[in-house]
Image (spheres, rainbow, N blue to C red):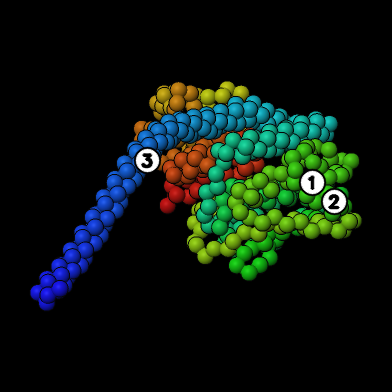
Amino acid sequence: MTDSTTTRIAALEREAEKLRKINAALMSRVERSTDQQLNAFSLFETAIALDQQVRDRTQQLKQALQSLEKTNGRLLQAKQQAEAASSLKSSVLVSVTHDLLQPLNAARLTLSALTEMASEPKSVALTDQIDRSLATLEDMLRTLLDISKLDAGVLRPEFGPVAIASLFEPLEQEFVATAAKRNLGFKIMPSSAVVRSDPLMLRRILQNLVANALRYTQRGTVLMGCRLKGDDICIEVHDTGPGIPEAQREAIFVEFQRGDAGASDKAGIGLGLSIVRRFADLLGHDIRLSSRAGKGSVFSVTVPRTLDPVAIPVREQASVDYRYGGMEGAKILLIENDLSSAEGLAHLLEKWGCDVAVTISKTEALERIHALDGIPDAIIADLHLDNGETGIQAVDVIRGEINAKVPAIIVTADYSAKAASDVSAFGHELLKKPIKPAEMRSLLSFLLAAEQSSARL
């Protein structure tokens, strides 16, 4: 083999090796390209699958939103129905309170007038017994109505600064006669503290605690006072009753559960302390009880103190006692659409020496004023009159017609906070039915005396 042949063979081998390398590179590129295509196809298939899942999920979400909208619609309807039912319960309870207390108010007013006419000891004893029965009925009825309102959710606290003295003084006046009849000592320690609470609910709590203490105490003393407890005021009611066994201490706060009352008092039906617990829970006030068998019990309610100022009514600032003066010959305009209540109150006012004009509406009241050509010394008007008219409106119209700011007392069997707020907003005095004659006499005497004093100035 010649050198040229060898050289040519070597060149061909080199060329063949080069071609093998090129082929290997091309095959590698083709394989990579195929893998990429396969991957792209796989990604495409995955994208299609995900798109379908998104469509499915979107459809499910639409269905869920539609279902939620329907549910929200039903919830809104249910909420509106519940609010309507609550409003109806509230109006029904106000109406029931008014209608039930009206005849009771008439009976107590008539009895008060009869009591002042009675002279024989036997007649006085009988009227006292009837008065006690009516007072018991009133207390039971008011308590049952409170429970109904709490269950209906229509009682809501209105918090504000409350002077302890504004609660203690009326309670002392209310219960001092009861304690005297039972030959018990009764004392309320004065306090200048101011607390944050709902004044009506807190007064009801204290009223029930004192009534409970007097009911179960056969001899000794009932004492109410305040104790400082950090940033709070602890209002305590002490009695020297039989004490409460530990096993009964929770049960007595349950409806219709009574302790062992004395033989002379079977009037309670076991609702007073239940109302205490319910009001305290609503207000967020802590109720505590400590007791020793044969020694007595201490009930307490803890209320937060406040430095907020409390407006003191002018009547509380007066230094002169007008309780029973200045009523002889006073001209009283009475606006009352319940004839029984009107007759009872008119008889009572006449026994006190007043000259009473009885009317049932502002229109009739104006006619009487024009016919008599005289301005009344005071107006007593029922809050709820016929045809949607109110005593507040009647007083306002009458004052404008006669151009005189005659003092006015609004009486009502409506125990709602709105009624009290409406009367207060116009600066009138408010008395709740059944009217307590002594309270009416004291307030009317004060207003007449204050008016006379103002006229002299």
Q: Residue furthest bottom?
A: 3
Q: Nearer the viewer, residue 107 or 221?
A: 221
Does 291 sit left or right of 381 as displayed? right
Q: Which marked residue is nearer to the observer: mark 1 or mark 3?
A: 3
Numbered circle sitting on residue 53: 3
What residue does disc 2 label? 247
3D distance between C-alphas at marks 1 and 2: 8 Å
Q: Amino acid at mark 3?
A: Gln
Q: Amino acid at mark 2?
A: Ala
Determine which quarter of the picture holds residue 354: top right
Work out whether mark 1 precedes mark 3 in sequence or the reverse, and give the earlier one.
Answer: 3
Residue 330 percent location from the top left of the image: 53, 37
Q: Where 413 sits versus 239, above or below?
A: above
Q: Which marked residue is nearer to the observer: mark 2 or mark 3?
A: 3
Does 69 sit left or right of 31 as displayed? right
What residue does disc 1 label? 251
Q: Nearer the viewer, residue 171 or 180?
A: 171
Callout 1 touching callout 2 (CB < 8 Å): yes
User: In this view of the protein, can residue 266 be seen by the observer?
Assistant: yes
Residue at the image point whose x is 83% and y is 38% from the top: 266
Residue at the image point whose x is 30% and y is 51% from the top: 39
User: In this view of the protein, can residue 142 be seen by the observer?
Assistant: no
3D distance between C-alphas at marks 2 and 3: 66 Å
3D distance between C-alphas at marks 1 and 3: 62 Å
Residue at the image point whose x is 57% and y is 39% from the top: 153
Q: Where 159 sits versus 351, above or below?
A: below
Badge 3 marks a residue whose secondary structure is: helix
Work out whether mark 2 precedes mark 3 in sequence or the reverse, and give the earlier one.
Answer: 3
